[in-house]
Amino acid sequence: MSNYLVVGAGCIGAAVTRQLVDRGDRVTVATRRGTELPGALAVRVDASNAVDVARVARGKDAIVNCANPPYGQWASLWPPIFAAMVGAAAVSEAALVTVGNLYPYGRASMPMTEDSPEEPADRKGEIRRDGWALAKAAHDAGEIRAVEVRASDYFGPGAEATAHLGRDFFVPLLSGSVAKIVGDPAQPHSWAYLPDIASTVVAAIDFPGQWGRIWHVPAASDKSRNAILDELRRDFAVTGRLSPYPGAMLALAGLFSADIREVRRSSYQFLAPFISSAEITKRELGVSPTDWATALAATVDSYR
């Protein structure tokens, strides 16, 4: 039986915890509020405090960083969290697995791979790039063992309202109303199913080969949101429709909301194809995406 520390109890932290608990591992979940998850020990921790994190990481086989600060606070919160995770891993000798995203690649050539140049298109991408660079440098120096699992936008049962394919997408459509979205609904986009993100994280933890690397989560679909809506209409009798936010409206709202301002800055991901390749993960970790029809049906059922 292995012993893990999962930092964060949001959608991804909960999914990772569930899979670890289900296979018989001991899991401690660390959050600022002491959020309780089934089968896990809950502790209160400031994720930006290396001493705090190191204290609860002592004796653990790995720290899984699933923290997810609000968009508008990334610049102030992520750097100390990244530093605390690396510091805690060094002191506790626990491996460090960070759940990341595709922002560091910016407007990359598609599909994005683990070897794509890191050329961020906004500050959030720079923050995520720099966080991995810090962990990678510590790994290369022999101070810690580190790896990063990068996923595109997630969906699935429990996906929160702020997810681009989350509650605010499905619930209005299922009720015959209008789902307001960011960007062009005709553009293909990679969508990562929450259980597949967790499966990739668990496989990365177990990987006996080379660390100090990036893994991509296999996407369940690269469909555009128009194509997803067509499928919902055909298979689930959905009558709602999509309506993109006008750029001017996002710009105006961004004057009053830091989170919306950051959504607008990363909207380039929905104005052109945004596709991730995970062939290396499939081949070396043996992780395959959940069948799209199965994942979509489970997601629809959860919102109904």
Image (cartoon, helix red, strand yellow):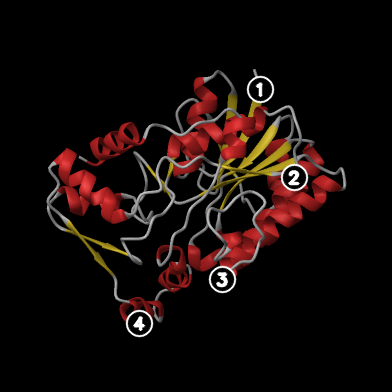
Q: Disc 1 designates what residue?
A: 2
Mark 2: which secondary structure?
A: helix
Quarter of image, res 300: top left
Q: Disc 3 designates what residue?
A: 122
In space, the residues marked 2 and 1 are separated at their CA atoms by: 18 Å
Give the residue type that dot 4 points to.
Leu
Q: Nearer the viewer, mark 2 or mark 3?
A: 3
User: In this rendering, would 281 be left or right of 50?
Assistant: left
Quarter of image, res 294: top left
Say whether disc 2 or disc 3 marks the residue closer to the N-terminus: 2
**Where residue 152 appears, x then y in whole percent?**
49, 50
Identified at 30% across, 38% down, the residue is 296
Q: Disc 2 designates what residue?
A: 88
**Where residue 128 appears, x then y in whole percent?**
62, 59
**Where residue 177 appears, x then y in whole percent?**
14, 57
Label 2 crowd (10 A; few <14 / some 14-19 / many >=20): many
Q: Nearer the viewer, mark 3 or mark 4?
A: 3
Q: Nearer the viewer, mark 4 or mark 1?
A: 4
Q: Residue 55 or 122: which is nearer the viewer?
A: 122
Q: Hey, which residue is sitting farthest right in the picture?
A: 141
> Can you say which quadrant of the picture contains the C terminus?
top left
Q: Disc 4 designates what residue?
A: 252
Give the residue type that dot 1 points to.
Ser
Identified at 74% across, 49% down, the residue is 86
User: In this rendering, would 10 be left or right of 156?
Assistant: right
